[in-house]
Image (cartoon, rainbow, N blue to C red):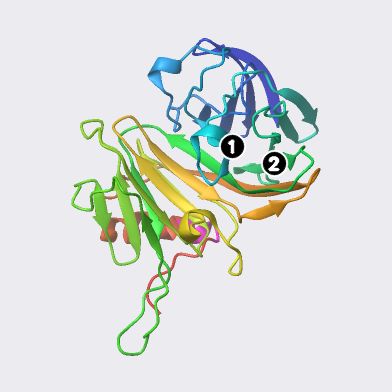
Amino acid sequence: MEITRLSWSGWPCLRLRVGELELRIPTEFGPRILYAGWVGGPNLLGLITADIGESGGDAHRLYGGHRLWHAPEDPQRTYVPDNEAPRIQREENALILEQATEAQTGIQKTLRISADESGQSFLLRHELQNTTLWPIRLAPWALTVMASGGVGILPLPPRGQHPRDLLPNTRLVFWPYVNLQDPRWGWGQCHLRLQQDPAQPTAQKVGALVPAGWLAYAVQGSLFVKTFPYEGAAHYPDDGCNAEMFVNGDFLELESLGAITELPPGARTAHEEAWFFLRDVPTPQSEADIATSILPRLVQLGLPCGGSR
């Protein structure tokens, strides 16, 4: 993994390159990833226009890109600013970003970024450490802001038949502001789609328990896929969600969550993702598009793709 320095969008950054893929990581705040894609290609991650080039201060900034939070969501603990420079350590095939302990929560965040042996994906390990003297109940929460104009894809559990399959196997969770008649929703038999449309400013959000352990986003002829663990016996936040998608008029977020744990003093919990990038993938407008253009590519990555049983 090649690591170099550059100035980008008004921020000093580290550029991580593996083969044809690259990430850009700011050094003045974080831990964050602000750029992900192919060398010389468009940024598949989204940035918040008002925050570009900004850093420092006491106010919470979204910035955009990829970040680490801890669930469940609460304004007092979730929106702690990450405006200070993280401690950065380099290893042979990894970059480690360690945030100073959050004074309000006593939690220290660490993001470890490495590349797989083939050089075709990045591996992210998100860690939360309890530095207080008492247990804290939380779950790691990895959020990725995607570039505007694309479609998020959430795989449903394998579909069944009536009257053979009489018990439920699908959990979808909606927030109070959700409107299921919003035209950005796409309801397929095996997948849920959510369109990012700059002309639609209202927020929508869905959470789900996703045994397949992946979420995807199609934009600009590319497909971004993030994978994450699924533990059948685990207790997940937000009424049992290990995956969520949020959209408004500016961006769409792909969010994965780890299990809720009672973290003892001094202990750490970790949540891992793998990021894959696929070229020449048209943005799907239907379930048939997903089956034709996307699922065969995911099968090549070894990902479970649901369907009927």
Q: Is residue 38 visible?
A: no
Instruction: Give the prevailing secondary structure in the magenta stretch.
Output: helix
Q: CA distance from mark 2 to mark 1?
A: 9 Å
Answer left or right for 297 relative to 288. right
The secondary structure type at the circle numbered 2 is strand
* Quadrant in the picture for residue 96: top right
Is 174 part of what is drawn in magenta?
Answer: no
The magenta segment is 298-302
**Lower sequence index among marks 2 and 1:** 1
Mark 2 = which residue? 128
Query: Number of marks in the image?
Result: 2
Numbered tag placed on residue 81 in the rendering = none
- 306 or 252: nearer the eye? 252
Answer few, some or many: residues within 10 Å of disc 2's Cα (few below 14, many 20 plus, some between 14 and 19): many
What residue lies at 78% left-to-right and 27% top-to-bottom?
89
Answer few, some or many: residues within 10 Å of disc 1's Cα (few below 14, many 20 plus, some between 14 and 19): many
Answer left or right for 307 relative to 277. left
The image quadrant where one finds the N terminus is: top right
What residue lies at 49% left-to-right and 24% top-to-bottom?
40
Mark 1 = which residue? 68
Amino acid identity at mark 1: Leu
Q: Is residue 79 visible?
A: yes
Amino acid identity at mark 2: Leu
